[in-house]
Image (cartoon, helix red, strand yellow):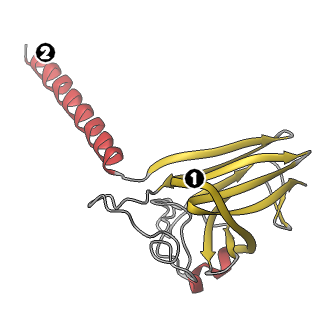
Amino acid sequence: MKLMRLFVVCVVAAVIGATSSIAQEKKAKKARPSLPDVAAATIDGNEITISYSRPKIADPKSGEARKVWGALVPYGKVWRVGANEATVLSVAKPVVIGGYELAAGKYTLFMVPTDGAGAKLIINKSLTRDDGRPKWGIPYDEAKEKANELARLDLKRGPTSGKVDPFTITVAKSGAGAGRITFAWDDAQYTIDLKNK
């Protein structure tokens, strides 16, 4: 009888614990105003994915529209290219992106937008923080991260065909063995070309 009672108590505790854990996980995901997404394309057998979160123009607390370029995303400062955790680029095979040869693997992406015609895309080899947790998008300590930076590549800026919201990344094939990555938000987009090596 005592064993049966102990068994029932253990089962009830396990169910309560599992339910609580699931509820907390759902609440945490629901509480994030910038939802996660993946941009992906297979370019002549090379699977290219970018995992990121999608911030919106509207302030998540007040609902008021915000100025994106030069304000929410300041010019001349490193931006995490999205929200929440750092944006991660994954390439199954080597590529040449913006003239830089990149080995197969995973990398974090950051951007330095300017008040002109372009921006710099930072490719960083570090995926985790010092404690082993996934790298968070900000703050970006340039002095500390310099050793992890593989390249700072030129992005071309152009207008979008209409207002883009939330922030959107696309990876698309543009020709034989070639593709283009586009970072678009509000009325501006930044692009960079890539090709299989």
* Pointer 2 residue: 4
Q: Residue at x 36, y 52 (%)?
A: 32
Q: In this picture, is 182 found above or below 172?
A: below
Residue 75 appears left or right of 190 = left
User: Would residue 195 be seen by someone viewing this image from the given angle?
Assistant: yes
Query: Where residue 70 appears, x then y in whole percent?
Result: 51, 77
Q: Could you tell me if the residues under marks 2 and 1 are in contact, i.e. CB atoms within 8 Å?
A: no
Q: Residue at x 53, y 46 (%)?
A: 37
Query: Where residue 16 appears, x then y in whole percent?
Result: 19, 31
Q: Earlier in the sequence, mark 2 or mark 1?
A: 2
Q: Given the image, on which type of amino acid does mark 1 rest? A: Thr
User: Would residue 105 be seen by someone viewing this image from the given angle?
Assistant: no
Secondary structure beneath disc 2?
helix
Task: Point out the image quarter for the N terminus.
Answer: top left
Residue 167 appears left or right of 29 = right
Crowding around mark 1 (Cα neighbors within 10 Å: few <14, some 14 to 19, many 20+) is many
* Pointer 1 residue: 168
Q: In this picture, is 104 found above or below 132?
A: above
Q: Quadrant of residue 146?
A: bottom right
Q: Given the image, on which type of amino acid does mark 2 rest? A: Met
Query: Where residue 7 appears, x then y in whole percent?
Result: 17, 20
Q: In this picture, is 108 found above or below 34?
A: below
